[in-house]
Image (tube, rainbow, N blue to C red):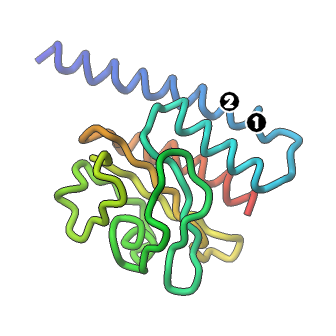
């Protein structure tokens, strides 16, 4: 049991360190830059490569659909209806969703068969309306935890100031 606890502690410590470095990297990348596209592109790239995740991107709310916006990774679904898949559900329910195994998520949209787990976090404008969702996929099961949700919410708060 101690070895399992130690492995969990090491995993949390590694995750916390990676997020500390990621937050520093994002701050440095956007400091002094006022171009939204440049900043968001760099933020998404920093997330993908610092955390070594399969796909990191934003979907933009357009009427009753999410439309693929900026991303890092292989091609993706272009349009997702409200309430459909993980992204559409996070948008409809106005909450972050962590999916340990996408095959077990009722209504999952398989944009890429390499995706095994996912986290989606809504992003709001100054009026509190959801305008984007941050979608992150991993090629491994059970990748995302509440720590990821907390830390990624800090990053979405930065993105909210840019949109």
Is label 2 in a helix, a strand or a loop? helix
115 to 127, vertically: above or below: above
Q: Quadrant of residue 69?
A: bottom right
Quadrant placement of the C terminus: bottom right
For the residue pair 126 and 98, the one nearer the viewer reads as 98
98 to 90, vertically: above or below: above
First along the sequence among labels 1 and 2:
2
- Residue occupying image coordinates x 43% and y 28%: 15
- Residue occupying image coordinates x 28% and y 38%: 140
Q: Which mark is residue 24?
A: 2
Residue 7: horizontal and vertical position, in percent? 25, 18
Residue 17 falls left or right of residue 33: left
- Residue occupying image coordinates x 68% and y 77%: 127
Q: Quadrant of residue 59?
A: bottom right
Residue 34 falls left or right of residue 113: right
Residue 50: horizontal and vertical position, in percent? 54, 30
- Residue occupying image coordinates x 60% and y 26%: 21
Q: Which mark is residue 29?
A: 1
In the image, farthest residue toward the bottom: 63
Residue 3 falls left or right of residue 27: left
110 to 42, vertically: above or below: below
Residue 147 falls left or right of residue 39: left
In the image, farthest residue toward the left: 1
For the residue pair 55 and 158, the one nearer the viewer reads as 55
Is label 1 in a helix, a strand or a loop? helix
Front position among marks 1 and 2: 1
In the image, farthest residue toward the front: 75
Residue 126: horizontal and vertical position, in percent? 71, 71
Disc 2 crowd rating (10 Å Cα; few below 14, some 14-19, many 20+) is few
Q: Quadrant of residue 12?
A: top left
Disc 1 crowd rating (10 Å Cα; few below 14, some 14-19, many 20+) is some
Q: How many marks?
A: 2
């Amino acid at each position: 049991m101690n070895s399992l606890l130690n492995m969990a502690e090491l995993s949390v410590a590694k995750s916390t360190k990676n997020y500390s470095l990621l937050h520093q990297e994002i701050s440095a990348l956007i400091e002094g830059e006022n171009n939204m596209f440049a900043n968001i592109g760099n933020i998404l790239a920093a997330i993908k490569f610092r955390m070594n995740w399969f796909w990191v991107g934003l979907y933009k709310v357009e009427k009753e659909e999410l439309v693929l916006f900026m991303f890092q990774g292989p091609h993706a679904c272009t349009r997702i209806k409200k309430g459909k898949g993980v992204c559409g559900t996070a948008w409809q329910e106005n909450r972050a969703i962590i999916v340990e195994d996408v095959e077990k998520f009722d209504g999952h949209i398989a944009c890429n068969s390499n995706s095994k787990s996912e986290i989606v976090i809504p992003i709001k404008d100054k009026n509190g309306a959801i305008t984007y969702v941050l979608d992150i996929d991993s090629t491994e099961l059970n990748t995302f935890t509440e720590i990821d949700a907390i830390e990624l919410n800090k990053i979405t708060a930065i993105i909210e100031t840019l949109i």
